[in-house]
Image: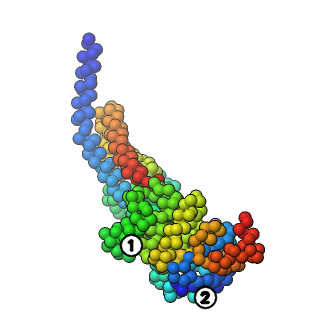
Amino acid sequence: MVLQVKGITKRFKTQIAVKDLSFSLAEGEILALIGKSGAGKTTALRCICGLERVDEGTIVVDGLPLCTEGIYVDQKEVRKVRQKVGMVFQNFNLFPHLSVLENIMESPVRVYGMDKEEAKAKAMDFLRKLDLAEKAEAYPHELSGGQKQRVAIARACVLEPKVICFDEPTSALDPQLSEEIAYVIKDLAKDRNLSVLIITHDMNFAKRTADRVIFMENGEAVEEGRTETLFEDISNERIQKFMSN
Amino acid sequence: MGTISELMGNTVELLNYVLALLPALMSGVVITLKVFAFTLVLSIPMGILVALGRLSRLRIIRRLAQLYIWVVRGTPLLLQLIFIFFGLPMIGIVFSRFNSVMIAFSLNYAAYYGEIFRGGIASIDRGQYEAAEMLGMSKRQTFLRVILPQVIKRTLPAVANEVITLVKDTSLVYILGLSELLRAAKIAANRDVTLAPLVVAGVFYLILTGVFTKVLQQMEERYAYYE
């Protein structure tokens, strides 16, 4: 298992955002956490990325623990774990003052000491695959939402993470682009054997991309199953209700 | 006809007078520019530190930065100059004229720049920090490579304002007997009982501020490549 999450709980002052959530993610698998806004799915994702700290529970990425029963490893170890996790933010958070290429090269060159030419070649490789090669010198504000998202994907992938997380990947896209990004995500999982964790409230998108789905409500996982079986389960009232909304 | 030749004669006389003034005024400009340049070079990095102090996670540092800004912005620069040059020797701390000027000016301007940069830093979206964190960047790298370049762009108009104010504030160093532009002009004006030197000084100030305005405009344009 590339990612193991055991009994994580996250509290904010008075309310519990994530409650006793457990799941695991296999190599090359695509898992979607779905639920309404406020269901705790984004908080769960942020905990897995280490942007937020859990109060209880265990998170292990590719054999390296991030935290064990609520106790975190030290800062240096956290960085090592985080290196294995890529993140595509909901609003992408590209660096506006850097070109597309510079956005992608910044971390490999400055943080991981990769040779500039090598990083550039690698970045261009990703850009070509994502059909963005001609935008290499452009700045983020010159790109459409879909293009920004692909740059964010390239920026995360160039570091060769084991898991890549998407926070609401369809929220900034029109339906046709959602379809495209679904292909891109599936390709990443298939070609690179990347494990993908998707946070979404878009049922159709989850249905189209994910191998497995976890359904969250009030911070808890309430349903879990293979995509093809879970959505067809007419007898499941909760799913049918959510689908019809 | 007599009046015209009289007028021409007066004009020539005035021009000659102004030309004779120029060496004294130019040496005043040199001092003005020296104070200006040193202050700028010292106060901008100090301002960044003040801003970081104001945003520190440590309460005590936040409070100290706040106190510093309050005192420095809350009292006239002229008073600060007098205090450092004439006041501090009373407790045995003596600085030269020029050093006193540099200390007062850079401490004063650092407070203003500090507040400008603090606003700039606070205006950067939290997502930028998170993206940098996910890319493995250290706090230092995040600040220098991601945050600061964006802060510079955003605060440039406000910084430009302070730069122009600084050109004119340099005239305050007369109080310590340094012959900057305005003092040089005033000495000539008193000696020759005429306002002409002051008018010439005014023109010099306009030229200086004009040049700096242009330079800052070009910097703003250079940063206009995004957003």
Q: Mark 2 and mark 1 in contact (Cβ < 8 Å)?
A: no
- The subunit carrying tag 2 is A
Quadrant assignment, res A214: bottom right
* Residue A141 placement (x, y as % from top left): 47, 55
Residue under label 1 = A108
Give me the C-alpha separation between circle 1 and circle 2.
32 Å
Q: Earlier in the sequence, mark 1 or mark 2?
A: 2
Look at 27% across and 28% down and name the residue there.
B14
Comparing A43 with B10, the one in front is A43
Q: Label 2 is placed on what type of residue?
A: Glu
In the rendered image of this protein, does residue B178 appear above or below residue A205? above
Q: Is residue A166 left or right of residue B189?
A: right
Identity, as a three-letter code, of the amino acid under mark 1: Pro
- Identified at 35% across, 51% down, the residue is B36
Q: Position of residue B171 (x, y in %)?
A: 37, 46
- Could you tell me residue A13's position as x and y percent? 68, 75
- Residue B70 in sight in this render: no
Quadrant containing the N terminus of chain A is bottom right
The number of callouts visible is: 2
Q: Nearer the viewer, residue B86 or A181?
A: A181
* A227 is higher (above) or lower (below) than B38: below
Query: Are there few (<14), some (14-19), or many (20+) residues within 10 Å of tag 2?
Result: some
To which chain does the residue with label 1 belong?
A: A
Instruction: Identify the element where label 2 is drawn.
Output: loop
- Residue topped by disc 2: A69
In which quadrant of the rendered image does the C terminus of chain A lie? bottom right
